[in-house]
Amino acid sequence: MSNELIAASLLLALTVMVHSVGMMALFRWVMRSLGIAASGFWPAAWLVIRIAYGLVAIHLIEIAVWAIYYWRQECLPDLESSFYFSGVTYTTVGYGDIVLPEHWRLLGPVEGLTGILMCGLSTGFFFATLSRLYAIQQKGT
């Protein structure tokens, strides 16, 4: 069980690092784009679409981190199953059609909690960006 806890802690830390780096890159890009996006509906809509793509890309990288770990540790039979399990677990869909071996099963709930936290950060980022965009547009009217 101690190997499981160590692995869960390291995967959590790596996921947070990936999310932090991705969000900072996205944040810098958004700050440069807000002025252009404030010029009308379509530029603002395009900005929101690109933010969504960026956030999904960050989450897919994080899912891949967990999936590659499962695959390398031979927790699941192949890489495709590892990605599927990781995606279902990270997003807390939890179909239950593929499960981890008993000695690795603690990783599943930790990945789910990590996914909830990272999605919450992304939601907060989305809200903050839209609030800022709204404030900029209100100033201009």
Image: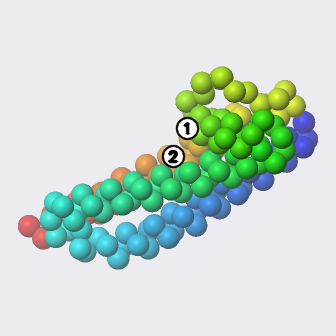
Give how far across and how far down residue 51 sits, in percent. 38, 59
Occupied quadrant, residue 87: top right
How many C-alpha atoms fall within 10 Å of the one at disc 1: few (<14), some, or many (≥20)? some
SS for dot 1: loop
For the point 8% across and 67% down, which residue is it? 141
Q: Which residue position holds label 1?
A: 91
Q: Residue 50: which disc?
A: none
SS for dot 2: helix
28 to 1, vertically: above or below: below
Disc nearest the viewer among 1 and 2: 1
For the point 69% across and 52% down, which residue is it? 65
Residue 2 lies left or right of residue 57; in this view the side is: right
For the point 50% across and 70% down, which residue is it? 25
For marks 1 and 2, the one nearer the N-term is: 1
Q: Residue furthest right?
A: 2
Residue 44 can be seen, yes or no: yes
Q: Residue 119: which disc?
A: 2
Whether tag 1 and tag 2 are in contact, CB under 8 A, the answer is yes
Residue 3 lies left or right of residue 132; in this view the side is: right
Give how far across and how far down residue 111 sits, in percent. 67, 41
Give how far across and how far down residue 83 sits, in percent. 65, 42
The amino acid type of the residue labelled 2 equals Cys
Quadrant containing the N terminus is top right
Occupied quadrant, residue 98: top right
The amino acid type of the residue labelled 1 equals Thr
How many C-alpha atoms fall within 10 Å of the one at disc 2: few (<14), some, or many (≥20)? some
